[in-house]
Image (cartoon, rainbow, N blue to C red):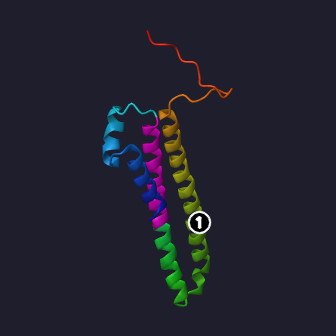
Amino acid sequence: MSTAIYTRHLVEHRYGRPLEDLRRDGAHGGSGDPVLPIVLRRLGGLAETNAHARAARRNLDAAWQRCRSGEHTLDDLVLRYAAEVVDLERREQSEAEAVWDLLDVRLLLDQPAGPSAFGRPAIRPRAG
């Protein structure tokens, strides 16, 4: 499973809804989740990088096949495509990690206030 697909599934799992529903809510601003628009934007960038990486892999494969067939003048082309694939895969991983971090931030925002810095529960005003 590619990093982009895994990240999409993780987003859907964490939000409990398909990505299309999340995009619809994000477009209308109705989610109330301050992290969702950023997650969606980052996920879109990840999908775009993933598409570029797939195209670069296809180009590398085609150049490699031509090179293996005896066209040694393509060595530089193979090296260029290989470098491009490595760069795009690193960028894809970095973008996925940014989405994962945002999902962690979202989880932290959903947590109730924990103990204070002194190890005691934070003082909360009484009701009534």
Task: Determine whether 91 is above or below 116 in the image.
Answer: below
**Amino acid on which the number 1 mark rests in the picture:** Val
Task: Determine whether 79 is above or below 10 in the image.
Answer: below
- Closest to the observer: 97 or 78? 97
- Closest to the observer: 100 or 14? 14
Left or right of residue 5: residue 89? right
Residue found at x 31% / y 40%: 24
Residue found at x 52% / y 48%: 100
Magenta region's main secondary structure? helix
Is residue 37 in the magenta section?
Answer: yes
Q: Position of residue 96 (x, y in %)?
A: 52, 53
Residue found at x 48% / y 46%: 42
* Mark 1 Cα shell of 10 Å, populated few (<14), some (14-19), many (≥20): some
Q: Quadrant of the C terminus?
A: top left
- Closest to the observer: 128 or 83? 128
SS label for mark 1 = helix
- Asked where in the image residue 122 lies, by quadrant, the reply is top right
- Closest to the observer: 102 or 113? 113
Is residue 46 in the magenta section?
Answer: yes
Q: Position of residue 49 (x, y in %)?
A: 49, 57
Residue, far right: 118
The residue indicated by pointer 1 is 86
Residue found at x 35% / y 32%: 29
Q: Quadrant of the N terminus?
A: bottom left
Q: Which residues are magenta?
A: 35-54
